[in-house]
Every structure is written in C-alpha cells, then in structure tokens.
Image (cartoon, rainbow, N blue to C red):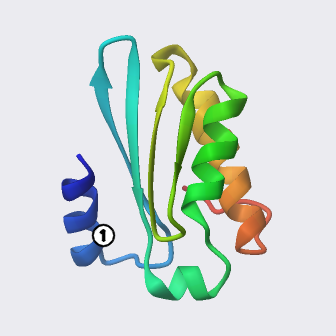
Amino acid sequence: MGIVAGMYSSISMNRDLPIIAFADADGGAKVSARGTHDLVVCGLNLGAAISEAAKAVGGTGGGHDIAAGGFIPYSRKEEFLSRLDSAIGSQLGHHSSSM
C-alpha cells in the first residue's frame, strides 16, 4: 500500500496536498501517507500528524515527515480523517487542508 501511495504521489497533478491511502485489514484499516519535499519545506510532518490522529481514535501511527503510516479502527475512519485534516492544516498554516 505504501508503494502505491508513493507511486500515486509521484504522478499526482495536485502536489499541494499529501496522498492518504487506506487498505482494509483484520481488525481495522491500514493507513499510508506520502507528501512532497515542497510540503515538508512548508511545515508538513506526516509522521506527527498520523501519530496524533491515530492515537486520538484508538489506533497507532508514525513515520517520517514525508512518509508515514498507521493502523486505526475501521469504524473510526471518518473521525481519523477529520483529525488528520486538522493536524495537517495546522502544520501548513491552513484552517483546513481540504483533503
């Protein structure tokens, strides 16, 4: 899944937002995220954002500023996305990153 997110981020037309991918797994959902160097320069830290959002919904996560992943309860996917959107928006100085 991380490979797919990485490949997509390299061909994506909108490089102003990170790529977030999900895969169903036993007991929850795997999350993979990829950003760009330009986003990191602007303050993006996906490892911190994924960690914060996953922990808030009873999951786990972490990684690097440009690439991160986690595992969350599937039933809390929408809440996770909302919290992740907020965390990334705060890092990049936006009220919402409109993911």
Closer-to-camera residue (62/73): 62
Q: How crowded is mark 1: few (under 14 residues within 10 Å), some or many (20 or more)?
A: many
* Residue in the picture at 64% in, 21% down: 58
Residue at the spot x=29%, y=24% of the render?
Answer: 24
**Which percent across, then down, holds residue 6?**
26, 65
- Residue 35 lies, in percent from the top left, at 44, 70
Q: Look at the numbered disc 1 and give the secondary structure of its residue.
A: helix
Residue 94 vertical placement versus 77 (above, below): below
* Residue 83 locus on image (x, y percent): 69, 42
Instruction: Note whether 86 is above or below 58 in the view shown.
Output: below
Q: Is residue 23 left or right of residue 3?
A: right
Q: Give percent across and percent down for residue 81.
A: 58, 40
Which quadrant of the rendered structure holds the C terminus? bottom right
- The residue that disc 1 covers is 9
Count the labels in the image.
1
| 55 w.r.t. 19: above or below | above
Residue that appears at 50% across and 69% down: 17
Q: Which amino acid does label 1 sit on?
A: Ser
Question: Residue most toward the front?
Answer: 63
Q: Left or right: 27 with respect to 8?
A: right
- Is residue 98 shown left or right of residue 17? right
Horizontal arrangement in the rendering, residue 67 relative to residue 73 (left or right): left
| Image quarter of residue 39 | bottom right
Query: Viewer-proximal residue, 63 or 20?
Result: 63
